[in-house]
Image (cartoon, rainbow, N blue to C red):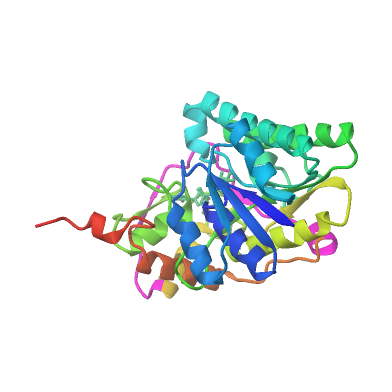
């Protein structure tokens, strides 16, 4: 039986493919490559020495998706595909609602038609919005504060309604905190389009010399050093969390949400210091205004995933930075062919 991975060429998707293959699962990937590169999947095969089918397909192409289900004996789906930039979603909300919602609806309709009712959904801690208390538990109220986060929250509610209409479904909603780092091989990693929005890819590009200095968004939060505190989780730990969630789902019915974090928060300056140690160089920064929408502190209560999925993150901030730096050093232009980037004389 085969696991279908939507958006499997993406940052978290490709790392999850590796862990699924290493755990002995057969997989197929559907990706429209709108925000990823086929090269990532080529490298997944190289790393695992395993072959798997890839379909270049938009999930809203219902006919094409049905053919994938016809041609493969699919047992479960892990659904990563979707737009995921908070800032972009504020400027282009309709693009986010159209893509993220319609893709998921089409996927679920086709799954239903082919009697596939096991689904792991890539959700996000952003569904919690501004929380009063930390650590954040899965029972914390959902109050996303941006269109991207609201698509994740709405999809969680859509999947709850789907389960309520047919209790044969088994659905896991995985709420990621802050995924960072890269596979130890240095062959796959985060490959953001344009200037990175997120902290660690921005730091890594300063360290490699592509960007001049880090802008620290505010240093007067009520935290250890005044800078924002987040729960950074190694993307390989995150991939392993998906394997555990899938394996639990294969033997149960029901719908449940799980926080995938480390349960430990690090400030911006603590991350910067860890990165300097990993890269062996000073990374320049300047403190600027707070970023609208940012909260001071956000980190997970991870007890539910530990108890029910028998999973917990094990990699610390130093390993996250080391693996991120190795990827950045070996791939200064991400998955772009380096020769393409060299200026011809
Ligand atoms: C982390 C900390 C910033 C950049 C976002 C999304 C969330 C999820 C994870 C998808 C904050 C500070 C950042 C910079 C900085 N993505 N920072 N300078 O905002 O916690 O979460 O990514 O699901 O939905 O909201 O992550 O990496 O952007 O910021 O000072 O150039 O670093 O203020 O304290 P965030 P981030």
Q: Return the x and y of residue 143 as percentages of the image width and height.
A: 70, 34
Residue visible at 25% across and 55% down in the picture = 340
- Closer to the camera in the image, 88 or 269: 88
53 versus 255 height, above or below? below
Residue visible at 65% across and 57% down in the picture = 27
Task: Examine the image and state in which quarter residue 21 appears.
Answer: bottom right
- Closer to the camera in the image, 332 or 142: 332
Task: Examine the image and state in which quarter residue 212 appears.
Answer: bottom left
Q: Quadrant of the C terminus?
A: bottom left
Q: Which residue in the rendered view is the most extreme toward the front?
A: 71
Q: Quadrant of the N terminus?
A: bottom right
- Report if residue 194 is visible in the image: yes
Which residues are drawn in magenta? 279-308
127 versus 181 height, above or below? above
- Closer to the camera in the image, 242 or 274: 242
Residue visible at 81% across and 41% down in the picture = 115
Q: Which residue in the rendered view is the most extreme toward the top?
A: 94
Judge whether residue 23 is colored magenta. Answer: no
Q: Return the x and y of residue 256 as percentages of the image width and height.
A: 82, 47
Q: Return the x and y of residue 280 as percentages of the image width and height.
A: 37, 75
Q: Return the x and y of residue 249 as percentages of the image width and height.
A: 82, 54
342 versus 120 height, above or below? below
110 versus 222 height, above or below? above
- Report if residue 182 is visible in the image: no
């Amino acid at each position: 039986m085969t696991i279908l991975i939507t958006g499997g060429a993406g940052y978290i998707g490709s790392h999850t493919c590796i862990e699924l293959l290493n755990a002995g699962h057969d997989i197929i990937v559907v990706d429209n490559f709108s925000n990823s590169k086929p090269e990532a999947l080529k490298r997944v095969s190289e790393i695992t020495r395993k072959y798997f089918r890839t379909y270049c397909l938009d999930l809203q192409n219902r006919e094409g998706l049905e053919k994938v289900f016809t041609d493969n004996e699919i047992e479960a789906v892990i659904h990563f595909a979707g737009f995921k930039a908070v800032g972009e979603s504020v400027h282009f909300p309709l693009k986010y609602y159209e893509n993220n919602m319609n893709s998921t609806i089409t996927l679920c309709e086709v799954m239903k038609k082919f009697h596939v009712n096991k689904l792991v959904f890539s959700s996000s801690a952003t569904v919690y919005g501004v929380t009063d208390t930390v650590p954040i538990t899965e029972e914390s109220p959902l109050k996303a504060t941006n269109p991207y986060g609201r698509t994740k929250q709405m999809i969680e509610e859509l999947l709850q309604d789907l389960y309520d209409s047919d209790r044969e479904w088994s659905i896991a909603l995985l709420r990621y905190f802050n995924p960072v780092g890269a596979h130890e091989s240095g062959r796959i990693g985060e490959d953001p389009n344009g200037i990175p929005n997120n902290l660690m890819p921005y730091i890594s590009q300063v360290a490699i010399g592509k960007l001049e200095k880090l802008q620290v968004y505010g240093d007067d939060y009520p935290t250890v050093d005044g800078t924002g505190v987040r729960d950074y989780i190694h993307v390989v730990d995150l991939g392993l969390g998906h394997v555990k969630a899938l394996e639990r789902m294969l033997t149960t019915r029901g719908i449940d949400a799980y926080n995938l974090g480390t349960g430990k928060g690090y400030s911006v300056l603590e991350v910067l210091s860890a990165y300097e140690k990993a890269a062996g160089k000073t990374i320049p920064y300047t403190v600027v205004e707070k970023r609208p929408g940012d909260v001071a502190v956000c980190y997970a209560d991870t007890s539910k995933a530990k108890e029910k999925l028998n999973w917990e993150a094990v990699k610390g901030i130093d390993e996250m930075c080391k693996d991120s730096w190795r990827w950045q050093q070996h791939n200064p232009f991400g998955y772009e062919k380096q020769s393409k980037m060299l200026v011809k004389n």
